[in-house]
Image (tube, grey):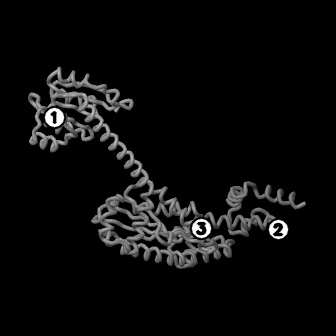
C-alpha cells in the first residue's frame, strides 16, 4: 500500500485485455492504483520482487506458465498478496486447482466493470480485515511481552507449589518462552537479611524488592535467566544454561548487593536438574543451601563480633596483627581476612587503624602526651608511621589537631 492506495499489478499476455482491465473501472475511486503490467508470468514474478503489490489480477491461460502456477509462485514468496484469476473457463476443475493454489477470487470473461468492481472491493475488504487483525495481534503481543515477567513469576510460583496440571504446564512453556522441559537447569535463591532485626515488615519487603531490582539490573541482558519473586518475596533465579559461566558470577553479584544495600546477602544454589518436573526439588535444594549459608553466616557474624571486641581491647598491643588474632581464634588468616571484609566492609588493617586513630584522638584531647608517646600508647612503635596514618585519617598533623582542639575549647 502506498499513500493509502492498494498497489495492483495486471498480468495478461494480450495487451488488449490489460488495457480493458485498466480502463473499465476507476481504480483510484476504489482506493487502488495500477503500479505495473506484465505480458507473461515471468515478467510478473520480476515485478513482484520490485513492486510487491497488494493485488494481482492474472489471466489463467498464458504461454510457458499459466495463471495458477503463477499464483502458486507468488503466494509462496508473498503470502499476503491477493491473486485474482481472470478466466474464460467456467470449469470446476480449474476452480479446484485455483483454490488449492490459494487464489482469492475469480473473474469470468467476458470482463465487465460491475464484476471487476465487485471483486476488487471484496479483496480490499479482505486486506483491510487482515491488516486490522495484524494490528490487534501486534498490540496484544506488545502487551503480552510487557506482562511476561509477571506471567512467568506466577507460572513458576505455581510450579514450585505443585499447583499446575501437566496440560497447563505443556501449554504455557511455549507461550511464556520457557526453555525446553528437557533442558538442564539450576535454581538460585537470594535472600537479604537485617541482622539487627530493626526493620518493620513493610521496610523489609521494600528491601527485598530492592534486592530483586538490583539482580534484574545485573542480569537483564542474559536471556538464559528467569528471575522472579517467590511467595516469601525472595529472589529466585533459574539458570537455563548451566553450561554457561553464570555460577562464577554469583560472587560478584553477592558483593554488588552487599555494597549497594549495606545488608547481609545470602545465596543458595541447587544441584543441576533436568526437566521442569524437578523444579520443586531444585527449589528445595536451593532453599536448604540458603538456610545452611544463613547458619554459617550467624556463626561467622559471632566470630567477627568477637574479633572486633578483641581489637578494641587489644589495640595497644604492638604485636597485634591478622595472624595473631587468627591464631587466638584458631582460624586460618586468609579465611579471617575474607570473612572480616565481608562482614565489616573494611579490611582488617583498615578497621584496626580506625580503632587506633580514634583512640589517638581521644588521648590527644585528654592528655599532654607527645606524639611519639601517643603512638606507643596505641600500639604503633614507629612515630613517623603513626604521623602519616593520623594525617591520612584526620587530614591534620598531630600538632595541628591538638592546636585546633585547644582553640575550639576556649
Q: Is residue 407 above or below residue 7?
A: below
In the rendering, which numbered label is found on residue 367? 2
Task: Write the residue at 32% across / 32% down.
Answer: 6
User: Label 1, on which residue?
Assistant: 70
Q: Residue at x 34, y 65 (%)?
A: 185
Q: Quadrant of the N terminus?
A: top left
Horizontal and vertical percent for residue 32? Answer: 32, 30
Q: Residue pushed farthest right?
A: 410
> Residue at coordinates 69% horizontally, 61% vertically from top-left?
386
Towards the viewer: 335 or 183:
183
Q: Residues within 10 Å of mark 3 (few under 14, many from 20)?
A: some
Mark nearer the N terminus (3 vs 1): 1
Left or right, 20 with reference to 358: left
Number of the label disc, if any, that sits on residue 153: none
Q: Nearer the viewer, residue 279 or 163?
A: 163
For label 1, the SS is: helix
**Disc nearest the viewer among 3 and 2:** 3
Marks 2 and 1, Cα distance to the nearest angstrom? 105 Å
**Location of residue 109 (image quadrant):** top left
Between label 3 and label 1, give the one nearer the viewer. Answer: 1
Could you say where residue 299 lies in the image, as x and y percent from the top left? Answer: 53, 78
Q: Is residue 334 visible?
A: no
Considering the numbered disc 3 on the image, is that residue within a helix, a strand or a loop? helix
Q: CA distance from mark 3 to mark 1?
A: 77 Å
Residue 322 visible: yes
Amino acid at each position: 500500500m502506498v499513500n493509502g492506495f492498494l498497489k495492483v499489478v495486471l498480468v495478461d499476455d494480450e495487451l488488449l485485455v490489460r488495457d480493458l482491465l485498466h480502463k473499465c473501472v476507476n481504480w483510484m475511486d476504489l482506493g487502488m492504483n495500477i503500479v505495473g503490467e506484465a505480458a507473461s508470468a515471468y515478467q510478473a514474478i520480476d515485478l513482484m520482487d520490485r513492486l510487491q503489490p497488494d493485488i494481482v489480477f492474472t489471466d489463467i491461460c498464458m504461454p510457458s506458465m499459466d495463471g495458477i502456477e503463477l499464483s502458486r509462485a507468488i503466494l509462496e514468496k508473498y503470502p499476503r498478496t491477493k491473486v485474482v484469476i481472470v478466466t474464460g473457463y467456467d470449469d470446476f476443475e480449474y476452480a479446484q486447482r485455483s483454490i488449492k493454489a490459494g487464489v482469492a477470487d475469480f473473474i469470468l470473461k467476458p470482463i465487465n466493470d460491475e464484476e471487476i468492481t465487485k471483486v476488487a472491493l471484496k479483496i480490499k475488504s479482505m486486506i483491510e480485515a487482515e491488516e486490522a487483525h495484524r494490528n490487534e495481534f501486534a498490540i496484544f503481543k506488545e502487551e503480552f511481552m510487557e506482562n511476561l515477567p509477571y506471567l512467568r513469576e506466577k507460572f513458576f510460583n505455581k510450579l514450585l507449589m505443585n499447583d499446575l496440571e501437566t496440560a497447563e504446564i505443556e501449554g504455557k512453556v511455549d507461550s511464556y518462552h520457557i526453555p525446553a522441559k528437557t533442558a538442564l537447569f539450576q535454581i538460585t535463591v537470594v535472600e537479604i537479611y537485617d541482622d539487627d532485626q530493626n526493620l518493620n515488615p513493610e521496610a523489609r519487603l521494600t528491601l527485598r524488592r530492592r534486592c530483586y531490582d538490583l539482580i534484574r539490573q545485573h542480569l537483564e541482558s542474559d536471556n538464559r535467566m528467569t528471575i522472579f519473586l517467590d511467595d516469601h518475596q525472595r529472589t529466585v533465579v533459574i539458570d537455563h544454561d548451566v553450561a554457561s559461566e553464570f555460577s562464577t558470577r554469583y560472587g560478584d553479584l553477592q558483593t554488588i548487593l552487599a555494597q549497594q544495600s549495606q545488608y547481609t546477602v545470602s545465596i543458595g544454589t541447587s544441584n543441576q536438574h533436568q526437566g521442569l518436573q524437578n523444579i520443586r526439588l531444585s527449589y528445595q535444594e536451593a532453599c536448604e543451601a540458603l538456610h545452611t549459608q544463613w547458619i554459617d553466616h550467624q556463626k561467622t557474624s559471632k566470630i567477627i563480633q568477637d574479633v572486633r571486641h578483641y581489637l578494641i581491647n587489644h589495640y595497644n598491643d604492638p604485636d597485634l596483627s591478622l595472624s595473631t588474632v587468627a591464631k587466638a581464634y584458631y582460624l586460618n588468616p586468609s579465611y579471617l581476612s575474607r570473612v572480616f571484609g565481608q562482614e565489616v566492609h573494611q579490611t582488617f588493617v583498615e578497621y584496626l587503624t580506625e580503632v587506633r586513630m580514634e583512640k589517638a584522638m581521644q588521648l590527644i584531647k585528654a592528655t599532654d602526651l607527645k606524639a611519639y608517646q601517643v603512638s606507643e600508647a596505641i600500639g604503633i612503635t614507629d612515630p613517623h608511621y603513626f604521623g602519616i596514618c593520623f594525617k591520612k585519617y584526620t587530614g591534620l598533623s598531630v600538632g595541628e589537631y591538638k592546636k585546633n582542639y585547644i582553640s575550639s575549647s576556649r
